Image: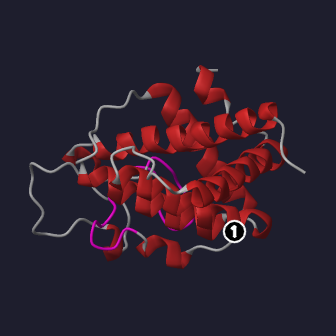
Amino acid sequence: MLPTLRAVRRGLAACVAIIVAIIVALTVAGCTSSKHASTSSSASSASPSGSSPATAAATRWWSNSAATVGTTIDPANPGAAAAKLHPSQTEYCGMLKQTLDARKSILPTAGKSDPALLTGAEAFAAEIQQVAPAGITASWHVLGPAIIGLIKSGGQVPTGAAGQTAKTLQAAQAVSADAKATCKLDLTAIVTGG
């Protein structure tokens, strides 16, 4: 059975909402200053000692049991904190809510060439995949790489990627529906500014 045009549009809006929320929240990470230095005691979350002061450090806009808001993300190993995480609906919903909250208060200013944007995306994807409850983890394993790929390509969807786009759309629909059902969060609201 083929989906109706209305269902496809709703799914596409959900996909766009999730990706926009995450990319805009990632912009927060790309637009931080040295005043947000790592507050984590873990050496893996600190910036390398040889990093350039002119380069903005990627910092988290989210918290979980492995890292807190404002901690610096190691660009050499953005997924380091994910190894300390496990599935947790509370942490999962918290990370999604913090992402939506960041979207409502911060305007995007980072460009595609900003390495902090990519570092933040990689850290977020790795951590959300680890805290996601079992029923939604597979969708994040599709959506996370799609977000990272979109950032790497400067926002361009690769031509001829219809199969992957369909999988990404399905994953985004699943994430959106799950967020609404389990976290009471409407991820599509950010498309309309609601």
Asked where in the image residue 100 lies, by quadrant, the reply is top right
Q: Position of residue 143 (x, y in %)?
A: 59, 58
Asked where in the image residue 111 lies, by quadrant, the reply is top left
Which residue is painted at 67% across and 33% down in the image?
188
Which residue is painted at 58% across and 60% down in the image?
164
Task: Give the dominant element type of the magenta stretch: helix, strand or loop.
Answer: loop
Q: Position of residue 18 (x, y in %)?
A: 59, 43
Determine the secondary structure under disc 1.
Answer: helix
Of residues 95 and 125, which is closer to you in this image? Answer: 125
Of residues 101 and 111, which is closer to you in this image? Answer: 111
Q: Is residue 69 above or below residue 31?
A: below
Return the residue found at the far bottom.
83
How many numbered marks appear? 1
Of residues 146 and 106, which is closer to you in this image? Answer: 146
Evaluate whether residue 78 shows in this view: yes
Q: Is residue 3 left or right of residue 45?
A: right
Highlighted magenta segment, given as a residue range: 61-78
Residue 141 part of the magenta-drawn span:
no
What kind of residue is marked 1?
Ala
Of residues 4 and 64, which is closer to you in this image? Answer: 4
Q: Quadrant of the C terminus?
A: top right
Return the residue found at the far front.
160
Which residue is painted at 42% across and 57% down in the image?
149
Which residue is painted at 80% across and 30% down in the image?
6
Residue 76 part of the magenta-drawn span:
yes
Q: Is residue 29 left or right of residue 90?
A: left
Q: Position of residue 104 (x, y in %)?
A: 52, 27
Q: Is residue 19 left or right of residue 52?
A: right
Q: Position of residue 158 (x, y in %)?
A: 44, 53
Q: Which residue is mark 1?
A: 138
Q: Is residue 27 above or below residue 144?
A: above
